[in-house]
Amino acid sequence: MQPSSSHENSIANLLQQNLEHLKPVPQEIPQKKVYRYPYIDKESIRDTIQNGKKAARDYNKRQQEKSKGINKINLELRRALKQDKHTTQQKALWIDFKQKHKLASKEPMAYNQKVLEFNRANGTHFLLRTYHQLKNEMLVTLPVLICFYAAQVKAMNAKKLNAGVTTMGTLPRLLTNSENIKRYKVEGVQQINFQNDAILAHVHNLVEAGILINYKSHGRNMGFSVDFNPEILAIKDHNPSKTQNPEKQPFIKFKTGKPTYSDDTTGSYKDKNENKGDAHGSPGERNDSQKGESTAATGTHRVTKSEEKPGGIASAESEKRGLSKISEKEILCAEKQDQDRVASSAGLCPPNPPRPEQNKPGGRGSTGSPQAPKNCSTEPVEVHPSKNLENRIQDTWELCLELEANKHVHHIPPMKELEHESGNGILSQPVFAELLYQEFMKVISRLKKKNQSAAGAFYRGFEELEDQKLKNFTGRYYTKTEMYREFKKWMWMINCAERWAKKRKWQFLYINDYLDTQRRDAKEVGFWYLEKAWKKNEQDKAKRKERRAEKRAAHTSRKAGIKTDRVEKYGYKSIKPGTNSRSLSDYEKVRAKVRKYLSGEIDFQELERYCSHNLNQTIVEGLGNLIDAERANLNRFKA
């Protein structure tokens, strides 16, 4: 059936009016700005999201304005469809037409032209496509992209500082792929639950809206790169020249390079003199070839190599100037004098007070005991529990050597002390995090007690923990309560891994590869894949708790039903408080007492007193008849 001419004219007029609103508007691409030290904090992320939402509202208004004429055309098509329904043959032709011309990926303008051609040729009334408006892109995808980009900018700055390169320049492009965006987790931001194709569609919609610009695809397996619109991106700039004072400038830990791995390679280094998957040598030996000023691990912080040994060889600059070398003994003596002077000025005891010389036997003062120094108390000083935990922190490299020698394979962490510290302690967050790192490495060392990794591999494991765990993407540490909760999860994961390995007689990877945060698939057999098992266990625990609650509710309801049924049959007094058992009636109670009276256990006065004080008055009045009836029953049974 062909559509009427008036209907075609109305649709044509509406389409002509709509084409006037669809003229492309040229957009100016803003130029990139040069920054000294760009960084994105939480405030910048919040401002960027707000700017993006504002731009999305403007974009949605423009899309709604462009779709206004299309909505009118669709209204006319719906009215015509009510009068003339599509046949099965027309629907089949429409499906073939869409597949032939690949209309699913067409833009609204090209799609609508094809639909109008098909409607005219076949007398159908299929609807036109309106212009897309941003919704899920702003609620879910954009915040994740911004947080991912903030972490990328932070990593870029750290890499430049470690390499000694200036941080001045333009902003980098966001380089990622849909799989990384889907798996990205950050505190305070909802994780994406869409499929990879939907995530890419969201990115393309954001590019079309002008929130993202300069999109470039690098292939199906290489991801894409894109820029944020500078008008939307709220980024802060920092002048590094203000912090060039070496006494105040913080030192940044050097991250050793970690090359990619293949399916048949389990290690981070491969050398003819090394075991596969292991790392040998001290951190200084491995880092000297990559960086002039290496770092060395200490108990709670990391210092430069020049500060590691105060009594060592002077720097190269000092040698060029002709300065004399200072012996280690002189430096130690000077430090000892400084410590004693500071302690005496504060009114405290020196660490090791010298004992007075005792005279020869028989001389004066030979029997006298040495006097304690003034202002020093002989009573033991109580040590704070937090101080005891802080004393457990060791030098990182020395601990790695102990772990290599299997000295902590039977270690049990002090869970009660750590729990108390997480809620009421005085340790700072970085110190508490360092303590948890070391306790975790001591416990996990038992997984490879038969074939232990080298100390360098343990050191690489420490670096991976300090870079990726117990802190968010901006580098801020979690609260101590969250840290302790995460530590308990790690302990469960270690026990799970140990049970799994014993059951299958499995030999774990070297510790630096096993703790690699990139190994999150089952086939890679990494430690952090067990987080999925932990989540499943938590879900199972919640389900078991719900089932127990349902069973308790059903049991309570069943007991209430039984009680209600018995109350209806026997009355309220027939139910004992707190039970479901039926209590004896007054008649049954008096019969029991009468039988005791007839057997001689009680006299009549006690029987009468019991009935008058505890039973109904009608039973007391008919007590004589009850005695006669019970006596007759006894005589009848005896006969």
Image (tube, grey):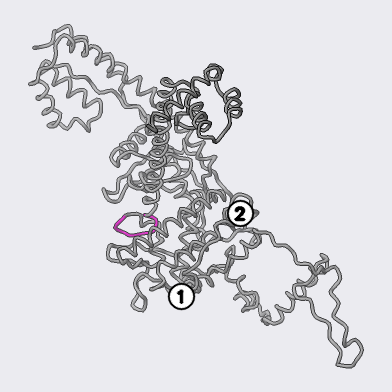
Q: Which residue is mark 1?
A: 281
**Three-letter code for the amino acid on which mark 2 is drawn:** Glu
Compared across the picture, whether 322 is left or right of 27 comes to: right
**How far apart are the two marked residues, 2 and 1, measured between alpha carbons?**
35 Å
Which residue lies at the image location 62% right of the left edge and 70% below the top edge? 307
Q: Residue 327: image x %, image y %?
A: 68, 82
Which segment did they paint magenta? 522-529
Picture layout, residue 86 above or below residue 253: above
Q: Main secondary structure of the magenta part?
A: helix
The disc placed on residue 421 is 2
Query: Which secondary structure, mark 2?
Result: helix
Q: Residue 201: image x %, image y %?
A: 30, 36
Please identify, in this view, whether the residue under mark 2 or under mark 1 is nearer the observer. 2
* Quarter of the image where one finds residue 389: bottom right
Quadrant in which the N terminus appears: top left
Compared across the picture, whether 71 is left or right of 446 comes to: left
Q: Nearer the viewer, residue 355 or 629?
A: 629
Query: Which secondary structure, mark 1?
Result: loop
Quadrant in which the C terminus appears: top left
Q: Is residue 605 visible?
A: yes
**Three-letter code for the amino acid on which mark 1 is drawn:** Gly
Q: Nearer the viewer, residue 180 or 213?
A: 180
Residue found farthest to the front? 639
